[in-house]
Image (cartoon, grey):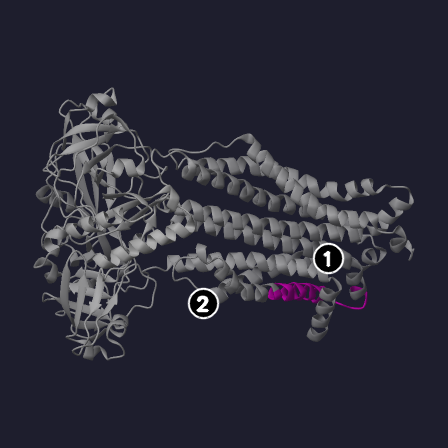
Amino acid sequence: MLRNYWLIAVRKLWKHKVHAAINVLGLAIGLTACLIIFLITHFELGYDRFHPNGNRIYRIVEHRTIGNYHGDDAAVQGPVALTVRGEVTGCQAVSPFLAFDWTVIVPGKDAGQQAKTFESPQGKSPVIITDPQYFQIFQYKWLAGNPATSLNDPYRVVLSEREVRQYFGNITPEASIGREVIYVGFDTLRTYVSGVVADWDHNTDFAFRDFISYSTAQISFIRKTFLLDDWHGVGTFSQGLVLLDKGVTAAQVERQFPAFVKRHFDLQPGQKASLSLQPLADIHFNEAYRDDYSRQAHLPTLYGLMGIAIFILLLAVINFVNLSTAQSLQRTKEVGIRKVLGSLRKDLIFQFFGETFVLTILAVILSLLITAPAIRLLHDYMPPGFSFQPSLAVLVFLAGITIITTLLAGWYPGKVISALLPVLSLKGQATRSLQPNRFLHRGLIVFQFTISLIFIIGTVIVARQLHYVINTDLGFDKDAIITIDAYGPVRDREVLAQQLREVPGIAMVSRNGGTPQASFHLNQGFTWPGSQNGTVAAGFINADTNYLRLFGIRLVAGRNFFANDSAHEYLINETMARQLGFRRPQSALGQTIAPAGEGSMAVGPGGSGQKRGPGIVVGIVRDFHSRSMHQAIGPVILTYSRQVPEISIRLAPTARRPQSVATVLAEVHKLWKTTYPHDEFSYKFFDETIANLYQQEQRLSGLMRLAMIIAIAISCMGLLGLVTFAAEQRQKEIGIRKVMGATVVRIFRMLTVDFLWPVALAFVIAAPLAWYFLHGWLKGFAYRTTTPWWIFGLCGLSAAAIAMLTVGVQALRAAYRNPVEALRAE
């Protein structure tokens, strides 16, 4: 019996090849999209979930309020972690650690053997400075050395097994003990291997492989550079991890922090600070806390992806069910004959479910075949390290989809058609009794095109907002500007900058602490004695005298600052002047403003803890967007400093063609290697830096575009299948109408109108829904584009045109068919 069912199923599929292909292809496309999204979300949600004590691991984070500014940071003052260890109860282990980009040099083992140099990917250095309690917090398998003592002494380093092979070749972990490893950053550290641990093979943001002893930092240049003893300076380097005692909650430990802050933090009027504990599971998703090693996944985007996956799968399954139920109407006579010949209802139900199962399995197999190529094609949208690896979770997911789709698509023919009386089926009267289900088919079309229209409108609006934020006037020039990071001694940076000024094709060079618009600027509170507004927090940019000219920032009053570190001259923007209390920005000229607190300021890369004192406002610059357009223009202060890590280059107008740019960059690379022979040369175009501020939006735009294409494709395949089926079912009616004088236009209208009104209804439903969701999304921008009514109308017309094209081609074929072909058997 099973063999007969299988043969009948195969014959049916072969007889209705077009419908079967549409069914399988539509479901396979939907399954592929859903499977890829499932794999991405499973990958991202699996970060740092493998730690045995993961629910007790936290990171110490800081919250600061300076006047009108509030900031959250993963960085804390240098002494915080070790002081928490000594004063705060409820912690089993507390470990300070410093993450920074280092160049690694491994000397040859024998005399005359050449040293090997290893560059770290920018912002993803595998090197941290920490102490033995780090290995109490995170569990490693030790291959050599002792976790309790390997990081006790200065100038010791623990390596992962992967680093041992990379640095020293194919040697045993024991053989690496005592080997020398040199780390070059602000200065040079010579360390010796004291332990080896096995690498983790799970997803983690703490993928460090070189662990330098914290005692090294306390007796070397790192102590001053990274402000390890300073309760005022905060950078992006000093951080602290905590492993709570069993039975202790984060709230119990956090209740001790206010007294801790009061004892150690020197807060001025208008300043507030607090500490809290961030769960380990939150680090991968919380973008509020900035660090230099983790990759934040945008949780709302993941939720949005899940929603897209559900909708696309619904579209595919609805399409499958719609076509399957429509086709089943042709099989009423077959069901009648089978029942007359003795088939039981359960046998018919089993056959219908079996045929649906075969189609679903074919779609699943096709989906598995195209998933890997699709992932390679869409690699720009995939998270780093992501790949398609069949697993138990994938098999369970696909099995669930197969069962659900089979039940949904097989239920109607299995339960409804198998219950028809044989006499009605053989007379051809059963089909008429089932016609009300046509409304079900049309309702499903309405749902499909509603989802498609939401994606179409969303794609247009998101693309329009992206074009607006990237192309609007930002208050400065962004084209043909290249920035490179140059650390090390200040003298080396100055020499390199001077050499760059002499390169043909470079119009201007500026040394600075950051571009005008960036993801992060140092923040400092400032006061003016005559202000009633208290402390005003401002983005702080250190720069040289060429900064304004290179970036095209316009002075509206006063002059530029002089090249003098001790002069303490400030430039402020118009917003800063107004927030300090000046009615006219120009009135701030000549006034003295002072940092809030003991010359304290947030110090980042290259700052070296430089303090600022009171200074005179010598110029007012026009407002410019120093942050992304998610935020309103805020106060900005610029001042002169030699201790800045970035060099910005403006290309001459004659050197902006691709070939000329390559020539200039080759010369810059050559000069870089002369000054920094061991450091990797890297650069960023300023306009790309600005575009990177909107990576989430760009990714959303791309995903919306893909979802739109998939949704339209699935919807149109379903529409094509239904109109083809309708034309076949009504071919005798069409033949009679043509014999009776009906024109091609009338028949065309008869076949298309029934399929176009659901699209119109879908637009009526989709337009307000799309406006509601997109209006909420646009509220996340302080500066946003408009959403005129004609965009919605144009999207609706586009959907109608696509549907008309899909239906119209098949309707014309049916209308032009010779009526003799349909009526010759009558």
Q: Quadrant of residue 316?
A: bottom right
Front position in the image: 486 or 751: 486
- Image position of 731 with respect to 800: above or below: below
Q: What's the residue at 79%, 57% (across, down)?
A: 421
| Secondary structure mainly formed by the magenta segment | helix
- Secondary structure beneath label 1: helix
Q: Count neighbours of disc 2 (C-alpha within 10 A) and say few if under 14, some if 14 to 19, many if 20 or more.
A: few
Specify the amino acid type for callout 2. Gln
- What residue range appears in magenta? 339-362
Specify the amino acid type for callout 1. Ser
Residue 5 screen position, x and y as percent: 71, 70
Residue 736 screen position, x and y as percent: 89, 47
Front position in the image: 480 or 326: 480
Q: Quadrant of residue 598?
A: top left
> Is residue 723 rendered to the left or right of residue 555?
right
> Is residue 209 rendered to the left or right of residue 318?
left
Residue 234 screen position, x and y as percent: 17, 46
Q: Which residue is mark 2?
A: 389
> Is residue 622 rendered to the left or right of residue 545?
right
Q: Which residue is mark 1?
A: 328
Q: Count neighbours of disc 1 (C-alpha within 10 A) and say few if under 14, some if 14 to 19, many if 20 or more.
A: some
Q: Quadrant of residue 402?
A: bottom right
Q: Which mark is residue 182?
A: none
Whether residue 520 appears in magenta in the rendering, the answer is no
Whether residue 349 appears in magenta in the rendering, the answer is yes
